[in-house]
Image: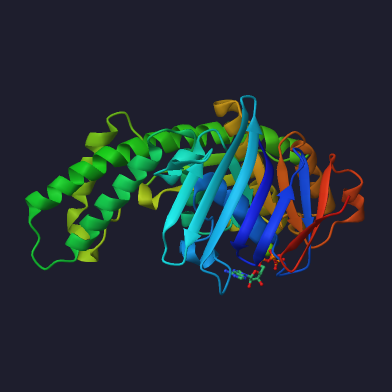
Amino acid sequence: MYIKEIELTNFRNYKEQKVSFSRGVNIFIGKNAQGKTNLLEGIYLNAFGKSFKNIKDKELIKFGEDYCRIKTLSENEEGENTTEIAIRSDGRKGIKKDGIKVKKASELLDRIYIIIFSPEDLRIVKDEPEKRRKFINRELCQIRAGYLFDLNEYNRVLKQRNTYLKEKEIDGDLLDIWDRQLAACGTRIIRKRKQFIEKIDEISRDIHYGITNGEERLELKYEASIEPVDNLEDNFYGILAASREDDIRNGTTGKGPHRDDIRISADGIDLRRFGSQGQQRTAALSLKLSEIRIIEEEKGEKPILLLDDVLSELDNDRQLMLIQSLGENQMFITTTEIMESVAGRLPKGKYFKIVEGQVASEI
Ligand SMILES: Nc1ncnc2c1ncn2[C@@H]1O[C@H](COP(=O)(O)OP(=O)(O)OP(=O)(O)O)[C@@H](O)[C@H]1O
Ligand SMILES: [Mg+2]
């Protein structure tokens, strides 16, 4: 699966722009604030139906215009497909797949796998636990049917329970209903996370040995708020009951997958607390590369990679390591400049220059 072409109309700082891509590497070079990230956002939008930024749809419309449209042409073994998204300033959104209207953005996702890699991802090792949970969630939503549903359900019940815990009068029977529901969907989340972390632990160790010339043994360990034991659902329910007094006092739910974390260590040393900056970034790179391999193994498809500004955050060796290990995936790379030493060793592809919302092919 690869993206052949994108057409942007009134999207962000683009007025009218059509770009044809290479099925290999696409490199977008431009100064700050020219439209590099916007272009990646357009690509992402046509796969997921929404932006990777936490924004309202209408913010995607070019200032002063009343609608925007993003259209992509993609190709796989079965032929060509188009997807089209139009957003109006009143917030209405229309999505079409091969010219036919679809109701839900989730219908766009079928068989397109996209991995986005930004400087923020390089901080995943040293950031707070929430970022690591997000990483796991995003992955599991792409590879495990039902995970997104469980997660939404869990968050919905958790929110209700937390609101109720703040009330003056608490009815134990009512709380009990939420405890049962939390334990049920929470159990499914914990099981899937456990399995995923074990898998990524194995794969990332291998990749990390590669990046560090066999010098560092990377290890990922699920730090579950509720241990994934055999009779998990009963146990979860029991823990909620046992911590009920605390929860009422604190006005919030203290235990559950919303408090999970992953411990990332190298040669037994906790990298979050004791790793050097370079070690933390290298481990983050290993995790990211594992994500790609997992999608390839599980789905039999090469994911499309969006690398936003990550090259400049890596030293020469790691830049090369990254690009070479991704040889066959379609890639979209943005950068303010390309280092000489790396330029000559990039896989074949297309170069583009972006200036003030205008994209020009370099070749
Ligand atoms: N809805 C919009 N309408 C018009 N312009 C917009 C809109 N949203 C964002 N922009 C502008 O688009 C410009 C380019 O943004 P973008 O994030 O793509 O830059 P960039 O090339 O990735 O820069 P950097 O190298 O700093 O990351 C910004 O100056 C921003 O103000
Ligand atoms: Mg940018």
Q: Residue furthest bottom?
A: 64
Foreground of the two, 318 or 304: 304
Residue at 65% across, 67% down: 13
Figure colour scheme? rainbow
Visible residue check, residue 42: yes
Q: How many marks?
A: 0
Residue 96: x %, y % from top left: 49, 44
Placement of 120 over or under 185, stated as above or below = below
| Quadrant position of residue 215 | top right
Quadrant observed for ligand 1 in the rendered image: bottom right
Residue 94: x %, y % from top left: 45, 52
Visible residue check, residue 236: no
Residue at 10% across, 60% down: 170
Q: Residue furthest front?
A: 99
Foreground of the two, 340 or 136: 340
Placement of 344 over or under 194, stated as above or below = below
| Quadrant position of residue 219 | top right
Residue 354: x %, y % from top left: 77, 62
Residue at 9% across, 53% down: 172
Q: Is residue 350 left or right of residue 67?
A: right
Residue 27: x %, y % from top left: 78, 51
Q: Is residue 79 left or right of residue 227?
A: right
Quadrant of the frame with the N terminus:
top right
Foreground of the two, 114 or 270: 114
Q: Is residue 13 left or right of residue 165?
A: right
Foreground of the two, 317 or 236: 317
Q: Is residue 249 left or right of residue 55?
A: left
| Quadrant position of residue 186 | top left
